[in-house]
Image (cartoon, rainbow, N blue to C red):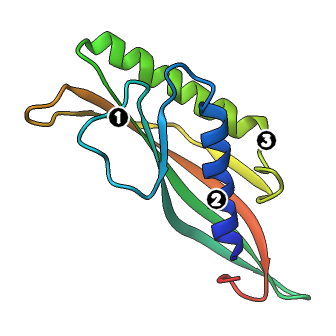
Amino acid sequence: MSMRETAIAALHGRLATSLADRNPAPLVLRGETVPQRLPPGGLVVLRDGETVEETAILSPLAWAIEHRAAIEVTVAGAMSAARSTLLDALLVAIAAAVTADRTLGGAVEWAQPAAPDFEDVEVEGAAAARAASVPVALFFTVAGSPLA
């Protein structure tokens, strides 16, 4: 398995484990489409993202990689205040999950969540929803090739 895949899988595992204790727990997925009905605890979808920087390190050849994944968080509810409160609580829990172990169990050298972008989501025939996208920079080093 590549270091990139190892890093993203470790981030997904960390999120799934850390958020499972919430009541109600959000549904934590990776690379899935948003279902028509949002679970009461919210929905957290990890997007694989993209590599934003590759820096060669010589002798021996290695690559310092910065890969940016995105965590999409969506919550529904009849009241705007309830949606905002639940979304904020999930964002705080996500930040705590990542910062509690910035190496993600040794899968990366450093994981750094950034500030979220917010969006109100309206779907015809469905309850109003609020969403946020949290970029997470994953830093790691690979030997030989950025694909390794």
Above-or-below relation of 4 to 74: below
Amino acid type for the residue under numbered disc 2: Ala
Amino acid type for the residue under numbered disc 3: Asp
Mark 2 — residue?
A: 9
Question: Where in the figure is residue 73, as x and y percent of width and height?
Answer: 42, 37
Residue lying at 60% horizontally and 50% vertically, measured from the top left: 12
- SS for callout 2: helix
Tag 1 and tag 2, C-beta contact below 8 Å: no
What is the quadrant of residue 64 in the picture?
A: bottom right
Residue lying at 69% horizontally and 55% vertically, measured from the top left: 10
Question: Where in the figure is residue 66, as x and y percent of width and height?
Answer: 65, 64
| First of labels 1, 2 by sequence position | 2
Mark 1 — residue?
A: 131
Mark 3 — residue?
A: 101
* Viewer-side residue, 123 vs 135: 123
Q: Is residue 86 left or right of residue 4?
A: left
- SS for callout 3: loop
Question: Where in the figure is residue 110, as x and y percent of width and height?
Answer: 76, 52
| First of labels 1, 3 by sequence position | 3
Query: On the rendered image, what quadrant is the C terminus found in?
Result: bottom right
Residue lying at 61% horizontally and 41% vertically, measured from the top left: 15
What is the quadrant of residue 100 in the picture?
A: top right
Query: On the rendered image, what quadrant is the N terminus found in?
Result: bottom right
Residue lying at 65% horizontally and 69% vertically, measured from the top left: 4
